[in-house]
Amino acid sequence: MSDLAKFDEAVLAAISKAPGRATYVLRNMMTWPNDHWKVGFWPALETSAVLRACRRLQKRGLIEESPTAYAVMKCWRPTHPRQESGHG
């Protein structure tokens, strides 16, 4: 798996753990020390990189924008609940 694919998976994990959050909040979750949110620790991450990942995930149909009262703030949520693997 490429670094870009790993990063996209981490962004998707953050959105799944906190649906409806703004792009900058997802970025903050991913830079939290000790991987508090269990989405991977990505130091020195910029909000624009998270936004690009969200656009890629949106294009693949995995996430969508959530409604917000702000004109320029983008919030994100999964399009479908994620299925956990390993259930038999």
Image (cartoon, grey):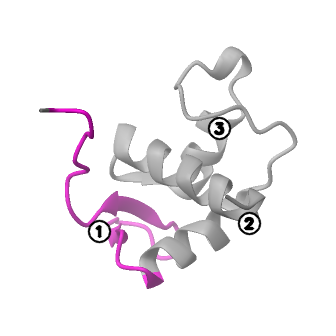
Label 3 crowd (10 A; few <14 / some 14-19 / many >=20): many
Name the side, left or right, on which 78 lies relative to 88.
right
Image location of residue 80, percent across then percent down = 20, 61
Instruction: Check whether the beta carbons of the residues at disc 2 and disc 3 lie within 8 A of each other.
Output: no
Residue appearing at x 25%, y 67% in the figure: 79
Image location of residue 60, percent across then percent down = 43, 80
Which residue has dot 3 on it?
A: 30
Report the Cα–Cα distance between label 1 and label 3: 22 Å
Looking at the image, tell me whether mark 1 or mark 3 is earlier in sequence order.
3
Q: Which mark is residue 67?
A: 1
Dot 1 falls on a residue whose secondary structure is loop
Report the Cα–Cα distance between label 2 and label 3: 13 Å
Q: Quadrant of residue 17?
A: top left
The quadrant of the rendering that contains the C terminus is top left
Q: Nearer the viewer, mark 1 or mark 3?
A: 3
Image location of residue 30, percent across then percent down = 65, 38
Residue 35 higher or lower than 2, as above or below: above
Q: Find the magenta span and give its range.
A: 59-87
Dot 2 falls on a residue whose secondary structure is helix
Q: Nearer the viewer, residue 69 or 22?
A: 22
Q: What's under tag 3, amino acid-wise?
A: Met
Q: What's under tag 1, amino acid-wise?
A: Pro
Name the side, left or right, on which 88 lies relative to 14.
left
Q: Which mark is residue 48?
A: 2
Q: Nearer the viewer, mark 2 or mark 1?
A: 2
The quadrant of the rendering that contains the N terminus is bottom right
